[in-house]
Image: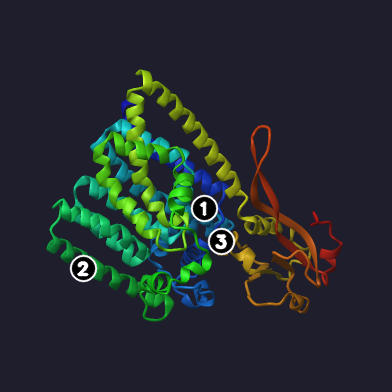
Amino acid sequence: MAPKFLNFMQFYGYDLLLGSIAAFYVFMAPYTKVEESFNIQAMHDILYHRHHIEKYDHLEFPGVVPRTFMGALLVSILSFPFVLATSLLQFPKIYSLYAVRLVLGCIILSTLHFFRIQIRKKFGSQVEAFFVVLTAIQFHMLFYCTRPLPNVLAFGLVNLAYGYWFKGSFYAALKCLIFATVIFRCDILLLISPLGLELLLSRSISLWKALKSCIITALLCVGLTMLVDSVMWRKLLWPELEVFWFNSVLNRSSEWGTHPFHWYFTSALPRSLLVAYPLFMLGILLDRRVLVYIFPVLSFILLYSKLPHKELRFIISSLPIFNLSAAIAASRVYNNRKKSFWKYLYIAMLGSFLISLGCTILTFMASYENYPSGYALKALHNIGHLRNNSNELWVHIDTFSAVNGISRFSENYHPWRYSKEEGIALAEFQNRNFTYLLSEHSDISGYKCLFSMKGFSRAHLHAGFPPISLVKDPKVYIHGNVKNNEIIHRSWPGC
């Protein structure tokens, strides 16, 4: 039994470590925000409404641009047995939210496992070990890998592409990137271009065979996404083409904010890589083999930097390659730790590992407080029941609350009912018969503020330990209808 256990841990131990951290993030911060809303609502509707497409959320709230159902459909199919069991046992829907996010995390981490195995074969088990350690002490990759973003769905295919690239299966790598581009994120085209150019210049692939392979794959993917999404959206549609037109041709994404050209290199990458950021640059100097892998990814970020609207999640697929270069540097420093100069570098590296871990803990604490409306609705479910259970409890969720932690998975069964109707003026609410309101406003005519939920506002530097504290301010206010006597006379936490 002992050798079998050791073999199991040797092969899956790293996956258990990374999976445990990702699962911890799921259970501690289960709620989702606006960027994830389409896929998470789609998963809910596929699982609970199934073939009744007329009940799906996206038909009432389509969003700025249409998104594909392909990722949501895959995750929902794999999650269905567990969700069916929770429904039969009448568990709250929040358990289904855990299920779909954990399934997504398993998919993404399995693709990272495939890439990691190729790292071991090419660079050795010690580099693999440092790759896992660096990934574990960073926050963003493991936090995002369970979040149903189009970027994360594409990230899984990019991991497969990296693995095939390292394995020498270059056409398979290109096919994975084409799949990710056509169906999930059109911006992966910025990664295919430099990678394909490098493979052509190194004569790893032939131009004609690559074109033939990529065109056939692209046509199959276009047909697949149009077949599925035209049914779900009830019109002829290739979602990612519309996203490309909106973001790149019309450049409308800049309406959501802009950053300077250097932002990815001076803000996003340092925050996401932490100690791996200086180490990846050292890795390029210490091992020339890594430069061939770094060049296409750096080119991808440089090309992406020309778009004014920037977010860290847009470049999340670059992190594994940077971590590889950092792991090579960490391994070299470790091997030379007994030499005069290197031992100081080794001590500095260990200290940086601890600082990175501290930054990750702090970032998690801030993220934990970043879903105030999800916690507010949960609290209302716990204390908002009324004695007259025959009446439905109508909850109106305003736009701010809907995008800061609430999804269909947050809803409870009868007698709770929910409305996300938009465009209601504050003065109009007193003419509506809502039982409760979740709102970003603290004062609404015709309603009494029952309690509020705080959320992360900013980090504060001060003398003492720890030197950084998190400042929380009220973000969501829960109001009760003044026409309901039980609500008015009951004791509430207050605002």
Image point (41%, 68%), residue name: 69
Furthest residue in direction bottom, as rendered: 235
Q: Earlier in the sequence, mark 2 or mark 1?
A: 1
Res 98 label = 1
Q: CA distance from mark 3 to mark 2?
A: 39 Å
Disc 3 on helix, strand or loop?
helix
Q: Is residue 68 above or below residue 456?
A: below
Q: Residues within 10 Å of mark 2 (few under 14, many from 20)?
A: some
Furthest residue in direction right, as rendered: 489
Q: Earlier in the sequence, mark 1 or mark 3?
A: 1
Left or right of 323 in this view: 475:
right
Colour basis: rainbow
Res 409 label = 3
Left or right of 92 in this view: 8:
left
Amino acid type shown at disc 3: Phe
**Nearer the observer, 144 or 408:** 144
Q: CA distance from mark 2 to mark 1?
A: 38 Å
Can residue 8 be seen from the camera position used here?
Answer: no
Quadrant in the picture for the C terminus: bottom right
Amino acid type shown at disc 1: Tyr
Of badges 3 and 2, nearer the viewer stands 2
Amino acid type shown at disc 2: Ile
Q: Determine which residue is flagged by label 2.
A: 215
Res 10 label = none
Q: Residues within 10 Å of mark 1 (few under 14, many from 20)?
A: many
